[in-house]
Amino acid sequence: MKNNRPVTGLLLIAIIFLLMPVQSYSSNPTNINSNDYNITPILSYEIVNVFPHDLNAFTQGLIWKEGYLYESTGLYGSSSLRKTDLKTGKVLQHISLSNDYFAEGITILNNKIFLLTWKEKTGFIFDINTFNLIDTFHYTYEGWGITNDDEHLIVSDGTSALHIIDPEKLEEVKQINVHDGIYLINNINELEYIDGYIFANIWQTEKIAVIEPDSGEVVFWLDLSGILDNVGHNKKVDVLNGIAYDVENNRLFVTGKFWPVLFEIEIASESESSVMTD
């Protein structure tokens, strides 16, 4: 486990690896684990730090903002929005959603927390300081993940589509389809906007797609296979889901549903495998 790491721009990493002839698998619309090949690079990771995480939290969204983590948790009857302390994992602020709602991803823009729900097709807007409800909004698809580029909301719905939303009018501006250059990438889940790229969990995998937002192309894959092998856990854990970025200190955090820990990781400078496998 590394204690310190150099500050490395994710944009520079992407450019370097786009120029390298690294083999990867391509995907089809229903399965990203086919044996086809293309030139999409695959990067690995190194663990920098490990922090406690509530193992009862079915993590759906994760955000870092001004020294704290904000997290949404799902499941009917257990959905919540919470503010937590990184070092201790202690919940500092919390509200529960009605049992009729299954919370999904969150993002923070202009001191407002935007929270999606799954099949209810309803979004909530909360004040970041008080967690008071400001407004609600609606959409016509399932809500999965959400992030923002400081100008627009970016929403995933479990398909290959990303919906670009005006945060004031709460209307769709455009839609992009995520692909690896050959096939569409489905099951796009929790999102985080980092250094001009969209990082996206792919549901039921240990893979994160790093997406160029204008074209929708996956510029590289981050393979987190085996990351939970580094810690003990005595409860059945669920899938990787949760990406947060501390822009001031260049720290990248990941966790998952019912995971007992949250990892700070760095993206490795070289791919440790030429093909993504499960």
Image (cartoon, helix red, strand yellow):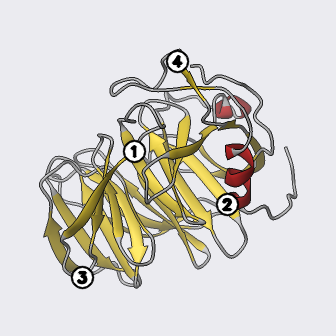
Give the amino acid type for the residue marked by disc 3 in the picture: Glu
Callout 2 secondary element? helix
Give the amino acid type for the residue marked by disc 4 in the picture: Asp
Give the amino acid type for the residue marked by disc 2 in the picture: Leu
Mark 1 and mark 3: Cα distance apart in space: 25 Å
Q: Determine which residue is flagged by label 2.
A: 11
- Counting residues from the start of the chain, the first of labels 1 and 4 encountered is 4
- Counting residues from the start of the chain, the first of labels 3 and 4 encountered is 4
Mark 1 and mark 4: Cα distance apart in space: 18 Å
Q: Is residue 136 left or right of residue 210?
A: left
Callout 4 secondary element? loop
In-front residue for pair 238/33: 33
Q: Residues within 10 Å of mark 1 (few under 14, many from 20)?
A: many
- Counting residues from the start of the chain, the first of labels 1 and 3 encountered is 3
Q: Determine which residue is flagged by label 3.
A: 168
Mark 3 and mark 4: Cα distance apart in space: 42 Å
Looking at the rendered image, the disc whose residue lies closer to the viewer, 3 or 4, is 4
- Expressed as whole percent of the image width and height from the top left, the position of residue 183 reads 40, 31
Q: Determine which residue is flagged by label 1.
A: 178
Callout 3 secondary element? loop
Q: Determine which residue is flagged by label 4.
A: 36
Q: Is residue 231 visible?
A: yes
Give the amino acid type for the residue marked by disc 1 in the picture: Val
- Expressed as whole percent of the image width and height from the top left, the position of residue 14 reads 67, 52
* Tag 4 near tag 2, CB within 8 Å: no
* Tag 1 near tag 3, CB within 8 Å: no
Q: Is residue 222 left or right of residue 230?
A: left
Q: Is residue 136 above or below residue 44?
A: below
Residue in the image at 46% along x and 32% along y: 238
- Counting residues from the start of the chain, the first of labels 2 and 3 encountered is 2
- Counting residues from the start of the chain, the first of labels 4 and 2 encountered is 2
- Expressed as whole percent of the image width and height from the top left, the position of residue 38 reads 57, 27
